[in-house]
Amino acid sequence: MVYQVYPRSFADSDGDGIGDLRGVLGKLDYLAALGIDVLWLSPFFPSPQDDNGYDVSDYQDVDPTFGTLADLDELLRRAHDHGIRVILDLVVNHTSDEHPWFVESRSSTTSPKRDWYWWRPARDGRPPNNWQSAFSGSAWELDEASGEYFLHLFSRRQPDLNWENPEVRQAIYSMMNWWLDRGVDGFRMDVINLISKVPGLPDGPLIAGGPLGDPWDGVVCGPRIHEFLQEMHRSVFAGRASTLLNVGEMPGVTVEEAVLFTDPARAQVDMVFQFEHVTMGPDKWGGTPASFSALKASIGRWQVGLAEIGWNSLYLSNHDQPRPVSRFGSDDPRWRVASACALATVVHLHRGTPYVYQGDEIGMTNAPFGSIEDYRDIESLNHFAHAVGVGQAPDDVLEILRGVSRDNARTPMQWSADPHAGFTTGSPWLAVNPNYVEVNAEAAMADPDSVWHHYRRLIALRHSEPVVALGDFTMLLPDHPTVYTFTRRLDDVVLTVVANLSSSPVDLDLTVGGEPLFVTGGPGADPAHLEPWEARVHRAG
């Protein structure tokens, strides 16, 4: 099981209001008690923090905000003492515009590093193509000094690296080897399937009839992506310990492509981190959400598609997603604990590697942000400015942001009922969710029926029952509007998972055999009758 830490929001050791590596060090006993196998650290590298660290200005150091390389070395040693591996967030589709590579590239059209990034002349006085950035506006930024544009699929301060240049690739592989030699156990590679662009960078289809186009056809799983990842594997991972982990975050990847990426015989990545189940529906900023049956169909399709070859990541949230209790469960105080436990049961009992994002193990919820001044996320701020600029009512835009903004995942970790939830003795960089008085780790660890203890039991079950990790998957009742149920089978052992993911009781025409291992959210006397947010796991054989 992988536990993701967003260092800025996890634990602050020095009272400056920002989490840091020594804060993570101080919580290793907590993570070990939960039973995690792998700790994933979101970026802590030097950065101007335009996109909260996903704009890296130096790949081989620690930003002073988060500590020092010595702090990281100590964290690696002590994590390994606990039996916990540590992987780093590798952001190499783009860098910060303050990275020395880009500074040199920008210095002159004849710079030796000019071709390390995507520089193009204007097209009839306009950007080189019509691609839109994921963070609103054009994906091209004009450099006044040279009169040329550079490509940025995300913030204008995150120029895309040109992976067509072999010098770029070798510099990245050298950096990765430097970290592995230092004791890091692998990488989670940010938007790694965007690194190969379609030759010629053609226009994308227009978005809603506007002047900007969708770039994703030209960048998602481009023509050389498999070649690049195989080269990376040969240059970085081949010949090293088999315990290293290489995870590819891949927006827009299909099941069929994921099989190719994760087939061990092809030597690319160990697993994909895909988004289909958390991006269903028209778009992030509005429209009717996908139906529950469509969500089940998506998850089931990935289970079946990777059943023989390949491996998937299992999750409902991370630093880019709202809290699962608020999005898929119920943050009504009556159902918060039960819904958090039910969702965790469903996620952890699938085939694949479960990921827990900090705070989900105590049932943290979305935050009640009041105004746009309360937000810090560049994606949310840019969308608000764009939406209001084209005439949408500010209150309507804010209502959407409250449900989907990435800042929902980035409010400080709620450790206790102490001021600022025990996250810091200073003023937190982002306001703490006011429900921390009731929802916090200290209270959860003291309550045997809490979300935290349920997560701990689920993690232990995966460690002790081979069927959880390796068993076949069969979806049951695929069209039921509120019940999620499936079986996992390995040899003579069968696990049946039944969960009512709603706030109303449900009666089922379903026979569930075997002895109950887990029952949550209700009295649990009859598996054919499920109380609101009740989840059951039965074992036969």
Image: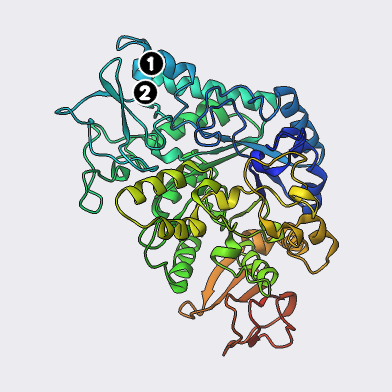
Q: Position of residue 408 (x, y in %)?
A: 57, 53
Placement of 465 over or under 61, stated as above or below: below
- Of mark 2 and mark 1, the one earlier in the sequence is 1
Residue type beneath disc 1: Ser
Q: Position of residue 532 (x, y in %)?
A: 63, 80
Which residue is rendered at x = 78% and y = 42% of the image? 83
Q: Position of residue 347 (x, y in %)?
A: 60, 63
Given residues 96 and 201, the one toward you in this image is 96
Given residues 51 and 260, the one toward you in this image is 51
> Distance between the Cα atoms at labels 2 and 1?
7 Å
Query: Residue 27 occupies which quadrant of the picture?
Result: top right
Specify few, some or many for label 2: CA neighbours under 10 Å numbering under 14, 14-19, or 20 or more: many
Q: Tell me the residue that label 1 is attached to.
A: 105
Are circles 2 and 1 on residues that touch, CB within 8 Å? Answer: yes
**Seen in the image, is 387 located left or right of residue 302?**
left
Q: Secondary structure at mark 1?
A: helix
Given residues 537 and 213, the one toward you in this image is 213
Specify few, some or many for label 1: CA neighbours under 10 Å numbering under 14, 14-19, or 20 or more: many
Which residue is rendered at x = 57% and y = 66% of the image? 472
Placement of 479 over or under 248, stated as above or below: below
Which residue is rendered at x = 78% and y = 62% of the image? 453
User: Would residue 155 be visible to someone looking at this image?
Assistant: yes
Residue type beneath disc 2: Tyr
**Seen in the image, is 51 located left or right of residue 282?**
right
Q: Tell me the residue that label 2 is attached to.
A: 117
Placement of 422 over or under 148, stated as above or below: below
Q: Secondary structure at mark 2?
A: loop
Q: Position of residue 272 (x, y in %)?
A: 50, 48
